[in-house]
Image (cartoon, grey):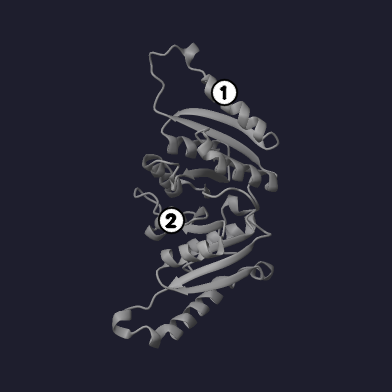
Amino acid sequence: MSATRTDPAWQNGTPKRILLATDLSSRCDRAQDRAARLAEDWGATLHLLNVIPGKEPPEVPSWRRSQSEAVQAAERHIRADLQGTLGEVVIERGEPAEAILRQAAALDCQLIVTGVARDEMMGRAAVGRIVEHLVQQSPVPVLVVKRRARRDYGEVVVATDFSPTSRHALDCALAWLPEAAVTLFHAFQIPFEGILGRDAHMAEMRQLAATDQEDFLATVPEAARARIQFMLKYGPADAQLARYVADREVNLTVLGTQGRSGLAGFLVGSVAKRLLACLPSDVLMVRQPRA
């Protein structure tokens, strides 16, 4: 690992505190099971957050502003399920995405875990925007769980365009999942293919990608490099990656997202946003730290 790069705190070993964002319904069971499994494997504390959208009606007396019986029952059930790993359970009212980010910072969590249902982010388009907001704004990685946690993340695909952003994603995968086999996936297309022709330049583009790969991995420790295989595909990145993940039945894909400072906030590349929606695997989004 290059000595000139500044590594974020979450990259120094596995997370010790995880925040599970859930609505306490059965549709979040997959995220809950995966978060609990990771917490157990890492010896981490799992904090649970449920955000009730909207504000508490001002006319409700303070003595009635306690958790509902249903929420209390759900909390008891979750504590029974997660007895060895569960830390603080927080119930909040307000704007969900901001509450999740605020609690993740307050609890010093190194990972946020959330879920999907019916192939839409958290089951509804409006809540999908919450997940997108988390990915855009969270300074720590966000794990979007889609699949049942039947097994550990034994095979991981890391998408790369050989940028510093995707290097941070690779470093995170290597640090957090030391036993997993890692596939570094890169897709390319021929510039001006309609004019230059595909076959004449295919070999050249493959060689350029191979050279970029060597430069990209040059500072990865030798022991970690032994775990990495390289997969190069021709075609659109999102379509090729989604097909590869589906064919291999990969259960985790790691994507890098790019950040920038200033009033414009943070950017998530359009390809990463499409992949977050269409990939059949769980997706770990790792944002490049601001300089």
Kindly report the distance in space between the C-alpha atoms of the residues bearing marks 2 and 1.
35 Å
Q: Quadrant of residue 61?
A: top left
Using the image as rendered, state which of residue 3 and residue 176 is in the foreground.
176
| Residue 2 visible to the viewer | no
Provide the residue designation for mark 2.
278
| Residue 230 visible to the viewer | yes
Instruction: Please give the count of numbered marks on the rendered protein.
Output: 2
* Image position of 213 with respect to 84: above or below: below
Residue density around tag 1, few if under 14, some if 14–19, many if 20 or more, within 10 Å: few
* Image position of 136 with respect to 20: above or below: below
Residue 224 locus on image (x, y percent): 66, 66
Q: Pointers 2 and 1 in contact (CB under 8 A)?
A: no
* Outermost bottom residue: 200
In the image, what residue type sits under mark 2?
Cys
Point 64% across, 31% down: residue:
79
In the image, what residue type sits under mark 1?
Gln
* Image position of 57 with respect to 141: above or below: above
Using the image as rendered, state which of residue 249 and residue 8 is in the foreground.
249
For the N terminus, give its image quadrant: bottom right
Residue 264 locus on image (x, y percent): 34, 50
Residue 18 locus on image (x, y percent): 60, 42
Q: Earlier in the sequence, mark 2 or mark 1?
A: 1
Using the image as rendered, state which of residue 181 and residue 251 is in the foreground.
251
Residue 215 locus on image (x, y percent): 54, 75
Give the left or right position of residue 121, taking residue 168 as reference: left
Q: Secondary structure at mark 2?
A: helix
Provide the residue designation for mark 1.
72
Give the left or right position of residue 46, taking residue 131 as reference: right
Point 50% across, 76% down: residue:
212
Q: Secondary structure at mark 1?
A: helix
